[in-house]
């Protein structure tokens, strides 16, 4: 997994190292061999052998006996379902996300921020002819997504500043923000308008309009977006206004007072 929060002596370094085996599959590989895992994780071969055997026993990895290669196991899906079933925010948001999807015929997602990435935790796929390889559980850097920008714009200033400092500016698509000043200006606009709009920042053709979701204490906890796929195009001002009003209403419906005090 990602680096630990702080230097707590209560964190198991061995467990952390073992979980890097699972992280290796985030790069898009469906199967990985032992030598590949050694290279990708930086762990010693004996450690990788130990960790993979443990993960196979737990059902988190599957080993093909013929090719001797590893692939993600069904135990990962089981663990994911525990998170989905036990999350009050997801339970509350799901019907609103799917209702918006039915209304527009477009993809609607809800995402949460974890460290420097946005993770999709609710997704209702639309009818786009061209769509990216985004699924439930997909994650991407916060600064190139409307969902991430809508969340970070409403974080406490010190926390937002730390996330901005950690951004690695890379061109993912033609509209990607490539410097700190532009990102800060974008967040100011999001904060002023109450919603985020991105054009071609994650991939070409991606247009996204997102609004933040707040908890009972008015802390931002997630964001919900409408996703449109239009290569080489932008939304008209009228479309942008309509979609921003719709997604803001969805976010407001999810942000119910007192809902997650015990979450």
Image: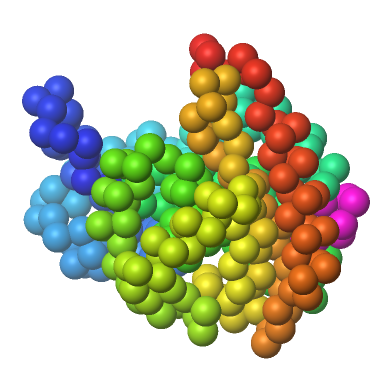
Residue occupying image coordinates x 75% and y 41%: 250
Q: Does 207 appear above or below 219?
A: below
Q: Quadrant of residue 183?
A: bottom left
The colour mode here is: rainbow
Residue 26 x %, y %: 40, 59
Q: Does 15 appear above or below 102?
A: above
Q: Within the magenta stretch, is there residue 102?
A: yes
Q: Within the magenta stretch, is there residue 124?
A: no
Residue reaching furthest to the right: 103
Residue reaching furthest to the bottom: 232
Residue occupying image coordinates x 67% and y 87%: 232
Residue 32 x %, y %: 35, 64
Q: Nearer the viewer, residue 215 or 131?
A: 215
Residue 145 x %, y %: 52, 61
Q: Nearer the viewer, residue 93 or 48?
A: 93
Q: Does 48 appear above or below 53?
A: below
Q: Quadrant of residue 207?
A: bottom right
Residue interval drawn in magenta:
101-107
Whether residue 137 is visible: no
Relative side of 185 to 2, left or right = right
Residue occupying image coordinates x 47% and y 49%: 153
Relative side of 80 to 117, left or right = right
Q: Nearer the viewer, residue 112 or 24?
A: 112
Residue occupying image coordinates x 11% and y 33%: 7
Q: Nearer the viewer, residue 53 or 74?
A: 74
Residue 75 x %, y %: 48, 38
Whether residue 16 is visible: yes
């Amino acid at each position: 997994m990602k680096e630990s929060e702080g230097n707590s002596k209560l964190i198991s370094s061995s467990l952390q190292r073992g979980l890097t085996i699972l992280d290796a599959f985030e790069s898009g590989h469906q199967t990985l061999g032992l030598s590949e895992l050694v290279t990708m994780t930086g762990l010693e071969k004996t450690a990788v052998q130990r960790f993979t055997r443990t993960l196979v026993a737990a059902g988190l990895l599957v080993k093909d006996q013929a090719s001797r290669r590893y692939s993600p196991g069904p135990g990962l899906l089981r663990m994911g379902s525990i998170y989905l079933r036990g999350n009050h925010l997801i339970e509350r948001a799901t019907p609103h996300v799917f209702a918006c999807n039915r209304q527009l015929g477009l993809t609607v997602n809800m995402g949460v921020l974890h460290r420097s990435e946005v993770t999709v935790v609710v997704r209702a796929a639309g009818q786009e002819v061209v769509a990216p390889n985004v699924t439930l559980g997909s994650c991407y850097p916060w600064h190139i997504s409307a969902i991430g920008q809508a969340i970070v714009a409403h974080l406490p200033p010190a926390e937002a500043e730390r996330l901005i400092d950690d951004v690695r500016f890379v061109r993912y698509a033609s509209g990607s923000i490539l410097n700190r000043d532009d990102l800060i200006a974008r967040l100011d606009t999001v904060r002023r308008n109450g919603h985020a709009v991105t054009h071609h920042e994650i991939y070409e053709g991606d247009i996204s309009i997102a609004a933040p979701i707040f908890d009972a204490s008015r802390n931002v906890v997630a964001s919900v977006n409408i996703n449109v796929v239009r290569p080489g195009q932008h939304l008209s001002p009228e479309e942008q206004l309509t979609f921003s009003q719709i997604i803001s209403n969805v976010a407001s419906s999810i942000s119910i007072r007192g809902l997650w005090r015990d979450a």
